[in-house]
Amino acid sequence: MNKEEINSMLNDLKQDLDIKEKIKVEVKPMKIKAASISLNKNTIRLNKNLLPQLEPQCIKYLILHELLHLKLKNIHHNNHFYETLYNKVDKEQLSEIERKIFASLLKLNGILL
Ligand SMILES: [Zn+2]
């Protein structure tokens, strides 16, 4: 998935969440994280090493997840975070996506399941 595809995914999700702020996406190698967000810099960071292993729906989820932190102005995974998330993604589909991302991260770090 290239930068353009990622940006178009970002724009669709921003529209869906009614986020008007400018958001930057950086693709950088990371060790243990799939993605992260800086709330002061409005910047989402995606793990460069992981991206080639992920299906588009997993990448979309990572962006959605970080955008929700931004929308809620909160980096914690509290009940409110999950309630908002479950409004956007079906619970079962979500656990399948999280499982795939986690498995790819483990594989990336040489830990086999
Ligand atoms: Zn999070």
Image (cartoon, helix red, strand yellow):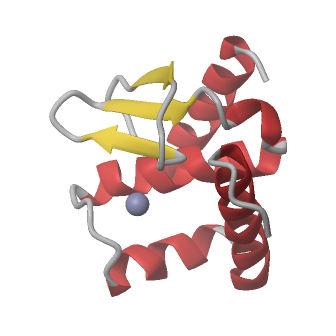
Tell me residue 22's x, y (percent): 35, 23
Quarter of the image for residue 92 reads: bottom right
Looking at the image, residue 52 lies above or below residue 83: above
Name the quadrant of the C terminus.
Answer: bottom right
Relative depth, front residue between 10 and 57: 57
Residue name at image x 21 percent, y 55 percent: 73
Relative depth, front residue between 73 and 19: 73
Taking 101 as reference, is 65 left or right?
left
Taking 43 as reference, is 50 left or right?
right
Residue name at image x 58 percent, y 78 percent: 86
Ligand 1 lies in which image quarter? bottom left
Name the quadrant of the N terminus.
Answer: top right
Q: Is residue 16 visible?
A: no
Residue at the right extreme of this rendering? 55
Report the number of numbered marks: 0
Tell me residue 66's x, y (percent): 44, 49
Residue name at image x 38 percent, y 26 percent: 23
Residue name at image x 34 percent, y 56 percent: 69
Q: Is residue 39 visible?
A: yes
Relative depth, front residue between 112 and 11: 112
Tell me residue 27's x, y (percent): 53, 22
Looking at the image, residue 36 lies above or below residue 90: above
Residue at the left extreme of this rendering? 40
Looking at the image, residue 103 lies above or below residue 87: above
Relative depth, front residue between 113 and 79: 113
